[in-house]
Image (cartoon, rainbow, N blue to C red):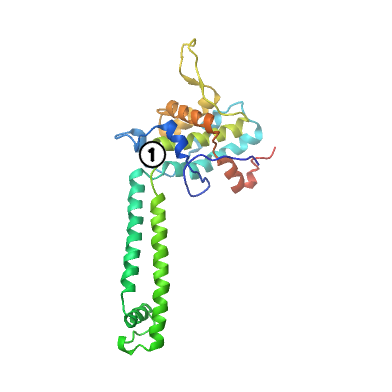
Amino acid sequence: MVAIKTACGCFSGHTILRLRLAHYKEICGKAIGPKQGSRLGQHLTSCGMQFTADQLATMVGAFSGLMDDRVRTTLPLILEEWGRVDLSEHLARKTPEQLRKEQRQLEQVANLARELRDALAGLAAAARFTLASRLDATARAPKAEAASNHEVQSAGTLRHLERRQLECLAQAAGATAGGWVPLPFRHTTVIQYLVLQDLAAIYEYVTGEIASRRVRGEDHPEAGRDYGPFWDFAVVAWRIIFGSNKGLSAALKRWAEARHRYDEASPVIANLALHHPEWRIYED
């Protein structure tokens, strides 16, 4: 199995990625959030990508003549699973507004945990014992004045345990809120980057060649235009995913610059090989 370096994002499921903020910021710029009225932003509100048989055939057809029989059999399975899991996670990635809302909720949890800790600490031992008894649905709450010394001491121990637990909760919520911040890039820019990293990994698995960006030279009638086998595959997949090839050229440029500087790659093929050994992805 090959060693895979990861570049971005934090996701559940097969792909666990972490974006290198300092690196990607140099390439993506400082813009935050999707453009208002962006068609791409509207498209990304949907999640759960399920490719049709025709779409799978179209993407497989982009590799005509570039793969052997074994890969031709495995590729539709890879694309289908990638669309269902990893791609769906990319498209459903939370917006900066959603992350900031969750961050405020976590901060509120931390504050309320400390308030509850202090409120419980202020109760008299007998009152705490009565309160604890009432929490047990099978026990009949005794009167406060009937609590014995032993019961009062037990309530004191319970108070210590609850204070510690609530403080742990407050600290955990506060620490989580501190790291629960949106990336300082456009929402759609991050998603495009993740998609291209996965497409590059799939292309390299199929062809055995390094995915790269190629641009027509000044002596060509289409000077400055992207071309090449990876571009051809990316265009086909991009149109299926996003409805058109709008934004692909700029996204490909950012991806290529990041890869050249930091040698970043997607672990999608390695993850699929681990989760589906019966596909024999790495076997000759």
Q: Position of residue 230 (x, y in %)?
A: 54, 27
Confirm whether residue 77 shows in the render. Answer: no
Q: How many marks?
A: 1
Which one is nearer the viewer's eye here, 49 or 138? 138
Residue 209 is situated, as x and y percent measured from the top left of the image, at 61, 28
Check disc 1 and report its element: helix, strand or loop. Answer: loop
Dot 1: few (<14), some (14–19), or many (≥20) neighbours within 10 Å? some
The amino acid on which the numbered mark 1 sits, given as a three-letter code, is Pro
Q: Nearer the viewer, residue 78 or 8?
A: 8
Q: Which quarter shows the C terminus?
A: top right
Q: Which residue is mark 1?
A: 184
92 sits left or right of 60 in the view: left
The foreground one among 18 and 45 is 18
Q: Residue furthest right?
A: 284
Residue at the image point whose x is 39% and y is 32% from the top: 29
* Figure quadrant of residue 169: bottom left
Q: Eyeballing the image, is 153 above or below 46?
A: below
- x and y, in percent, of residue 279 in the image: 63, 43
User: Looking at the picture, does residue 13 appear above or below residue 232?
Assistant: below
Q: Position of residue 265 (x, y in %)?
A: 55, 36
Query: Is 84 displayed left or right of 69 in the figure?
Result: left
* Residue drawn at point x = 43 percent, y = 38 percent: 191
75 up-or-down from 152: above or below: above
At horizontal 39% and vertical 58% (from top left) the residue drawn is 173
Classify the position of the N terminus by image quarter: top right
152 sits left or right of 61 in the view: left
Can residue 38 be seen in this snapshot? Answer: yes
Q: Is residue 209 left or right of residue 177?
A: right
